[in-house]
Amino acid sequence: MMRPVVLLVALGLSALRAGAQAPSFAPVIREAERAVVHVAATARRSEGQPRTLEDLFRGPELRRGMGSGFVISSDGEIVTNAHVVEGATDVEVRLADDRVVRARIVGVDPMTDIALLRIDPPGPLSTLPLGDSDAVAVGDWVIAIGNPFGLDRTATAGIVSAKGRFIGAGPYDDFIQTDAAINPGNSGGPLLDQRGRVVGVNSAIVSPAGGNVGIGFAIPANLVQWVITRLHADGKVIRGWLGVAVQPVTPELARAFDLEQPRGALVADVTGGAPAARAGMRRGDVIVRFGDEAVDESRELPSMVAATRPGTRVPVIVLRDGDEVELEVRVGEMPSSEAAAGPEERRR
């Protein structure tokens, strides 16, 4: 039996005073909730791990993670967050009609916090389409559906309050910020536009006390689509790699490099033998163009490089001693050691 959806809609007081009428999201939610699932992941004790007194009563299970997800294909593919199923040995999915089925992990990409699951459909499945997150604008209404605190298929609404947010989660931060209430358990659930298309995957919140304070973050749908495509093709996400450590160009550095304004990515270090080194890139170079794209900020470069297939030759323009120098870089494949490193250790 379907559980009721809890709908929480926050309207500005000024809009209420002006007599503005709130939009109804009921038709979108009725359709979308059929494709939203509850994800339960269990990580079991591995041999050699210490046992506690509590383990004697709990058995071999170490932890049980809870989150949300949504069906994207009729043959049983489900998107959720990587951190929901991280280290899991067993994953169960509860569908909208309360059927519980076992899921297998097709692929996980911790660097973007996306995981792809697959189930054997016990019957027809409703799906949610991925929309164009680039088309979403600040101020647009959005709807989040998930299972916060175990409250199945809870829907909340708000607006997109910012785009392109960098929150220090990794080198590919490009979050959609929303004031739609997101709480523990919403992770992996969809952020929808008013037409019921997924524009983001709810992933993180700012929460000093552990609950919603009106600042939540979703992974853009276009990035999600990119990750899923690569998981399908390779079973993992293969990323391009230059082998450089970069840092922002501050106003002080811009003056030192005779730039009219801060732009580009300052090369702080170059890995010996890496693609950048072989192309002649040096410490102190400022990368201002990668292929056909201008590099306005240093944090833009990792995504540009990652999206480039290894083996591709790319013209790169750097500023060196006041002059523009064009280099040709043959992009390499990001080593597994780089993918496993923390953001502060990782090279582009």
Image (spheres, rainbow, N blue to C red):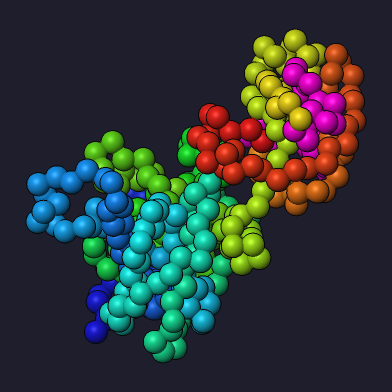
Taking the spot 29% from the left edge, 51% from the top edge, the residue there is: 47
Mark count: 0
Residue 344 visible, this angle: yes
Residue 17 visible, this angle: no
Q: Is residue 346 magenta?
A: no
Q: Nearer the viewer, residue 223 or 93?
A: 93
| Residue 63 position (above or below residue 315) | below
Q: Nearer the viewer, residue 106 or 35?
A: 106
Q: Which corner quadrant holds the C terminus?
A: top right
Q: Residue furthest bottom?
A: 123
Highlighted range, magenta:
274-301
Taking the spot 44% from the left edge, 54% from the top edge, the residue there is: 82
Taking the spot 70% from the left edge, 50% from the top edge, the residue there is: 307
Q: Position of residue 268 (x, y in %)?
A: 68, 20
Q: Nearer the viewer, residue 71 or 159?
A: 71
Q: Position of residue 162 (x, y in %)?
A: 51, 44
Q: Nearer the viewer, residue 165 or 14?
A: 165
| Residue 272 position (above or below residue 195) | above
Decide if residue 117 is on the left or right side of residue 322.
Answer: left
